[in-house]
Image (cartoon, rainbow, N blue to C red):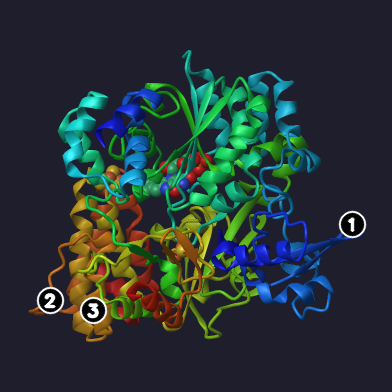
Amino acid sequence: MASVALGADDVARAFEEAGCDVVRTGSRGLFSIEPLVEVEQDGARIGYGPVGPQDVAAVLDGSHAARLGRVDDLPFFASQQRFTFARCGLTDPVSLDDYQAHGGWKGLERARSLPSAEVVEIVTASGLRGRGGAGFPTGIKWKTVLDARSADKFIVCNADEGDSGTFADRMLMEGDPYCLIEGMAIAAHAVGAGHGYIYVRSEYPFAIRTMRAAIEASAHLVAPFTLEVREGAGAYVCGEETALLDSIEGKRGQVRAKPPLPALQGLFGKPTVINNVLSLAAVPFILAEGAEAYASVGFGRSRGTMPVQLAGNVRHGGLYEVGFGITLGELVNDVGGGTASGRAVRAVQVGGPLGAYFPPSMFHLPFDYESFAQAGGLIGHAGITVFDDSVDMAHMARFALKFCAAESCGKCTPCRIGSTRGVEIMDHIIAARGGAPASRTRQEDTGYLGKALYSRAPDRIDVSVDAQVGLLRDLSDVMKHGSLCALGGFTPYPVLSALDYFPEDFGASSPVTEAAE
Amino acid sequence: MEDFISDWVARHGADRDRLLPLLHAIQEEAGHIDPSLVPVLAEALNLSRADIHGVITFYHDFRHEPPARHVVKLCRAESCQARGGAAVEEAATRLLGVPMGEKRGDGRVSIEPVYCLGLCAIGPNALIDGRPVARIDTRMIEQLAVEVNA
Ligand SMILES: Cc1cc2nc3c(=O)[nH]c(=O)nc-3n(C[C@H](O)[C@H](O)[C@H](O)COP(=O)(O)O)c2cc1C
Ligand code: SF4
Ligand code: FES
C-alpha cells in the first residue's frame, strides 16, 4: 500500500508495457527507496529506487542513478535480524510455491508432529511476549486456552493496528500473509481450536484483499482449521481485545470487564486465543528454528526480535526488525537518520497515541518492555514517531486528550468525561500562555471525524497556568486509576510526559514537578 | 435495498455476528446506510431497533447520508502531523472550499478526517476516492481542486 501510495501502480504498468515479467511483492520496509524495483539477472537481485514510470529504460540498461546494488547489502537491511519479516518484500505474497521455497510451513509441520502441550511449551520457552502492546507471555495465554475445557475454541488475530506510527501488521499481511496463516494454524493445533478470525481495520483494504486471497489458496493446507477475515468499521477502541470480540459478535465495540479472561470466556463465550499479528507471525520461526534460536536474541525479559516502525518526521522511515535492547537513540539517529526536515529532533512518541513523548536526553533508553515502563512510557506496538523542533507539545497533549474523547467507548466516566474536561484545561493553558497559532486550535475544534466535541473557547482566563497544570495532573491521576481499559488509563502518558519533559511549551511559571505536589 | 438485505441474509445467514459484514455490504452497495433501513435490519436479524441504531452510530465508518462525489480522507494522526499535516489540512479546506468533516453544499466533495492509514513515514497521507496518496502537498491539493470543480 505504501508503494502504491507513492505511485507503484504506474511503475509496474510501465515495466509491463516494456515487456518485463513483473512480480508485485510486499514492501521491503525502507520507504525512502520506494517504489523499489529489483531486477533479477543471473540469480542476483539488483535494486533501484525510488523509481518512477519515466525511469524504465534507464533501469533496464542498468544506468539509472538510483541503482542501489543488492538491497540486502544496504546497511538498513544488513544490520537487521529478520525473524518475522524474513520473506517480506522478497516473495510474491500469495504464491504458495514462493512461500514453500522460502521455508514456509516448516513450523506447522513440526507443530503437527508434536502433542499440543509440547507446542505450547516451545512457545513459552521462546519467551515470546504479545507484540500488540501489553507484552503478556504468549505461551501462558495459550496454556490457559489449552487447559480450558470446551468443544469450541477460537483463535482471533488482532489486526486492528490503530496506533499512529505503526504499520508492521499491515506490511506483514500485505507482504507475507501465509506467515500469519501458518502462525494461526499452529496456535489452533496448540490449543485445539477449529476456527479463526482475523479482525482487520477497514483502513487497510489491501491487507484485507491479500489475506482473503491467501486464506482461500491455503485452505487445503491448514484444514481442518478454517479461517475468515472480519473487517472493522473505524473504531480505535476495537483494538482492545474484548471490544474486538464484541465487534466480531456484531455489537458496539465496548470493552468488557475482566475477569472472565477471553482465554476462558472469549468469543461467543468460548475459550479464545487473541493475539496480535506479530505475535502469531513470530510463531512459525519459533517452531521451525526452535525456542532457543528465538530466545537467544533480546534484552532482559524481552526476548526475540521486535519489528520497530520508524515514522513521522524521520529521514529513513520504515520497518526495522531487530533484537530488543537497541537504544532509542540508535533507532532514531543511526537507523532513521534523524529528521526528514533536517531540523533537530525534539521529541519522539513511542507506542502510539497512548505512548509517552521522550526528548533526546532519554535516547539512552534500551528498547525493552521493562526499561520503557520504568521511564514512564511504553513500547506498545513499537511505533516510533519523530518530531522536529517545530512541534508544539502543548498542542500534542491536547491532541491526545481529544483523541481519547473521540474514541472512548463510553463505558467509564474518567475516560468519557475526563478527556473532554482535559481538552478544556489544555485550551485554558494554551490561551493563557498566549502562544498557539490560532489556526491550529480553530481547525481542531471540528473534532476527530467531524464529531462536535464540547470545547468552549476560553473567554475568561482567571486562573493561573500553574493551577490549570495542577488540575491536569489531578485529572490524569483519576483517568489512570479510574479507567477500565488502557484507552482512558494510558492517555495520561502522552499528556504528562509532554508536561514533564517540555514544560516550557505549557508556559508554566514554576518547575512543573513542584506544581504536582 | 429491502431485497438486497433479504438476499444477503439468505446467502450469508442471519446470526447476530453477521451485522457488521451486512452493514459493510449495504454501504458498499448504496454508498450509505439510510436510517429507514433500521427496522428492516432489525427484522432480518431478529434484533431490536435500538440495538441496530446503536451499532450503526458507534462505528465511524458508517454514513447516514449519501457521500459526496469525491471523498477526501485526510490523516490527522501524530505522524502525519509531524510531517506537516496541519498545513495540508489548511490548504485542503481552503482550496476545496469545505471545512474538515463536512460535505460541500454542491455535494461534489467532502473532507473527512481519518486516524492513521499505516503510511506514517511518508505522510501527510490521504485516501482520495479510496486511493492511497502519500506525501500530499499544496500542489496536489490544487490539482485535486481542479478535478473536483471540473
Ligand atoms: C484502546 C486499546 C487499543 C488496542 N489496540 C490494539 C491493536 O490495534 N492491536 C493489537 O494487537 N492490540 C491492541 N491492543 C491490545 C489488546 O487489547 C491485546 O492486549 C492484544 O491484542 C493481545 O495480543 P498480544 O498478547 O499478542 O499482544 C489495544 C488495547 C487497548 C486498550
Ligand atoms: S477507559 Fe474508555 S475506552 Fe476503555 S472501557 Fe473505559 S470508556 Fe471504554
Ligand atoms: S499517521 Fe498518518 S498515516 Fe499514520
Is residue B85 toward the left or the right of residue A35 in the image?
left
Q: Please, which chain is the residue tagged with disc 2 on?
A: A
Is residue A130 toward the left or the right of residue B105 in the image?
right
| Amino acid type, label 3 | Ile
Tags 2 and 1 in contact by the CB under 8 Å rule?
A: no
Q: Which residue is drawn at 57% across and 19% down?
A: A192
- Assign the C terminus of chain A to one quadrant of the image: bottom left
Question: Which residue is label 1 attached to?
Answer: A43
Q: Please, which chain is the residue tagged with disc 1 on?
A: A
The circle drawn on residue A458 is: 2
Say whether disc 2 or disc 1 marks the residue closer to the N-terminus: 1
Q: Residue at x 68, y 52 (%)?
A: A88
Query: x and y percent of residue A78 in the render?
Result: 77, 63
Question: Which residue is label 3 attached to?
Answer: A430
Callout 3 and callout 1 share a chain: yes
Q: Is mark 2 on a helix, strand or loop?
A: loop
Q: Residue at x 47, y 50 (%)?
A: A161
| Amino acid type, label 2 | Pro
Say whether disc 3 or disc 1 marks the residue closer to the N-terminus: 1
